[in-house]
Image (tube, rainbow, N blue to C red):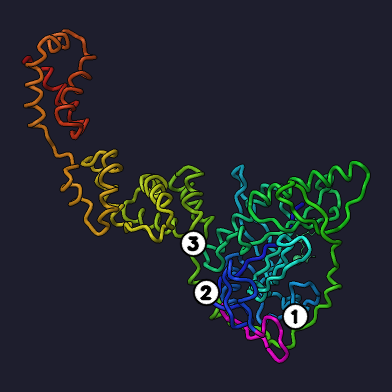
């Protein structure tokens, strides 16, 4: 049994209650205001953008939205939490009872219930690996707005948990509320894991695993923990409810602390903030601005357009790529070719230049013209890839058709020229002509080769074959 707690760092200009912004990798303890470090008299000032982001995620997960919704103080002391409490939500969180559909690696779908999503502020960071004697504290991250999403314990395999995190990551990127970068900690996942003998057995004691910083580590950490718990139980030992840390280097989880019960936090209503209120009109406005969600797009690409599963995921993963694909198929009505160009030549170019798709110099209209030229039979595919595409990149504003003409890449109907040339070839190879006419039909390839060579490969192979066949039928 697996239940996930996912922390989603909100990509806002300023922190949730302070005036300062936050960017990963900044010099330590330089992104701090008096509010965040709780100087006497400093009062929190709620950032409305966080409310908008919460409503968007709530709508995208079909959650029940609570208005009014309240902030609460969660009291605990860690060195990375200078106030001695965290502003969070306890009762009546902004979102409750949501659901997110995921696709399992075996191709089945599951609607996973989301217990709640609440607003809170992030804590700072304790750093233990800079010095053997001391721990360091970087408070930059404290006060950054978070949404904490908690699922019901109804994921049943490490892979299912991985798929859920991947779906959430795509979702928050599509909504534009979080960059989804797990390595930098903008999206963090804690996994609660327990085991039991069968579907009818009571739930086992859960262990919470923290410090998981990628989707592949979600899968690895839960797999390890499942095996560890089964081993323990089979030895006759009990599972202790505790928090464990995932260690990437050893590939194991290790105990961090015995888990506090909720009572230890002494939650009480946050006295410095008013309840948050919003209306049905606010909700409707956000509902209208919701994009098509990533799993919906995946299904359209995979089921309706019949693209391969990996192709469909590759096109869906980043919203900017998917949006480019959308505008391309609008123009070409050809998902297959559009996908091939996007995941082939365009992606290779972006990788080589190390730029994101939004910096790709060619508008979708240009790529659509390129695809049309190939489909019309006027431009051989290899010339499109090797010559026209690079020429277009060098002159992004130019018209692909004019460029192709200028570079003489286009195949014109050359029936007349081909026939003349074929007559000369037949005169040069009378024996071959005779043998062909006596039944050695395999010689057709020889004549096609001769003719192609004369046109330096720039003739339409279909047309060449027709001319060869037609000419050889008649006697020279
Ligand atoms: P806490 O703050 O103590 O971590 P939360 O309510 O935030 O508690 O999170 C509880 C998480 O643990 C949820 O994701 C829930 O699905 C999961 N969970 C609860 N019971 C079990 C269990 N027996 N096995 C696995 N996961 C569980
Ligand atoms: Mg929790």
- Give me the disc on residue 286: 2
Residue on which disc 1 sits: 83
Q: Which residues are magenta?
A: 34-49
Give residue 461's position: percent from left, percent from top. Answer: 22, 30
Along the horizontal axis of the image, is 454 left or right of 148?
Answer: left
Who is closer to the viewer here, 300 or 317?
A: 317
Q: Is residue 153 above or below residue 434?
A: below
Query: The residue tagged with tag 1: helix, strand or loop?
Result: loop
Along the horizontal axis of the image, is 423 left or right of 191?
Answer: left
Give residue 263's position: percent from left, percent from top. Answer: 86, 73
Give residue 344's position: percent from left, percent from top. Answer: 40, 45
Question: Could you tell which of marks 2 and 3 lies nearer the N-terminus?
Answer: 2
| Main SS, magenta residues | loop
Query: The residue tagged with tag 2: helix, strand or loop?
Result: helix
Q: Is residue 36 above or below residue 187?
A: below
Residue on which disc 3 sits: 292
Discs 2, 3 touching: Cβ within 8 Å = no
Instruction: Single out the residue that lies furthest toward the bottom.
Output: 41
Residue 43 colored magenta?
yes
Residue 98 falls in which quadrant of the image? Answer: bottom right
Residue 309 colored magenta?
no
Instruction: Single out the residue that lies furthest toward the right.
Output: 236
Q: Is residue 313 above or below residue 470?
A: below
Along the horizontal axis of the image, is 342 left or right of 284?
Answer: left
Query: The residue tagged with tag 3: helix, strand or loop?
Result: loop
Question: Could you tell which of marks 1 and 2 lies nearer the N-terminus?
Answer: 1
Split into 4 quadrants, where in the image is the C terminus? top left
- Which of the two marks, 3 or 1, is nearer to us in this view? 1
What residue is at 25 percent from the left and 56 percent from the top? 395
Who is closer to the viewer here, 337 or 96?
A: 337
Question: Could you tell which of marks 3 and 1 lies nearer the N-terminus?
Answer: 1
């Amino acid at each position: 049994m697996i239940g996930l707690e996912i922390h989603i760092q909100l990509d806002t200009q300023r922190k949730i209650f302070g005036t300062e912004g936050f960017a990963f990798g900044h010099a330590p303890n330089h992104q701090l205001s008096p509010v965040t470090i709780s100087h006497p008299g400093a009062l929190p000032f709620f950032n409305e953008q966080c409310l908008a982001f919460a409503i968007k995620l709530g709508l995208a997960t079909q959650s029940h939205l609570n208005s009014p919704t309240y902030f609460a103080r969660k009291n605990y002391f860690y060195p990375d939490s200078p106030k001695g409490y965290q502003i969070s939500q306890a009762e009546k969180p902004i979102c409750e009872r949501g659901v997110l559909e995921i696709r399992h690696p075996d191709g089945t779908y599951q609607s996973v219930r989301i217990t709640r999503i609440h607003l809170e502020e992030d804590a700072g960071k304790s750093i233990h690996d800079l010095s053997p004697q001391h721990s360091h504290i970087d408070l930059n991250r404290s006060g950054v707005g978070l949404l904490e999403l908690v699922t019901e314990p109804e994921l049943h395999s490490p892979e299912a948990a991985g798929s859920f995190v991947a779906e959430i990551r795509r979702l928050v990127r599509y909504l534009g509320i979080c960059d989804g970068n797990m390595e930098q900690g903008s999206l963090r996942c804690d996994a609660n894991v327990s085991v039991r003998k069968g579907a009818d057995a009571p739930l086992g004691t859960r262990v919470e695993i923290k410090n998981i910083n990628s989707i592949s580590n979600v899968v690895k950490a839960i797999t390890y923990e499942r095996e560890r718990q089964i081993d323990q139980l089979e030895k006759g030992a009990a599972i202790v409810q505790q928090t464990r840390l995932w260690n990437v280097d050893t590939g194991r989880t290790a105990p961090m602390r015995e888990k506090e019960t909720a009572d230890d936090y002494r939650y009480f209503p946050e006295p410095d903030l008013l309840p948050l209120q919003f209306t049905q009109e606010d909700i409707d406005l956000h509902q209208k601005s919701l994009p098509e969600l990533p799993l919906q797009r995946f299904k359209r690409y995979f089921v309706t357009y019949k693209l391969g599963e990996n192709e469909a995921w590759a096109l869906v993963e980043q919203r900017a790529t998917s949006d480019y694909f959308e505008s391309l198929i609008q123009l070409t009505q050809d998902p297959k070719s559009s996908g091939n160009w996007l995941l082939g030549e365009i992606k290779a170019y972006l990788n080589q230049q190390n730029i994101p798709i939004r910096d790709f110099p060619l508008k979708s209209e240009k790529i659509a013209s390129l695809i049309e030229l190939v489909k019309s039979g006027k431009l051989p595919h290899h010339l499109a890839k090797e010559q026209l595409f690079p020429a277009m990149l060098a002159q992004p504003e130019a018209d692909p058709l004019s460029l192709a003409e200028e570079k003489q890449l286009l195949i014109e109907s050359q029936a007349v020229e081909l026939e003349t040339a074929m007559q000369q070839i037949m005169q040069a190879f009378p024996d071959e002509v005779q043998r062909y006419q006596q039944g050695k039909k395999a010689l057709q390839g020889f004549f096609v080769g001769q003719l192609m060579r004369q046109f330096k490969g720039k003739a339409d192979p279909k047309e060449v074959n027709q001319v060869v066949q037609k000419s050889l039928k008649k006697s020279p």
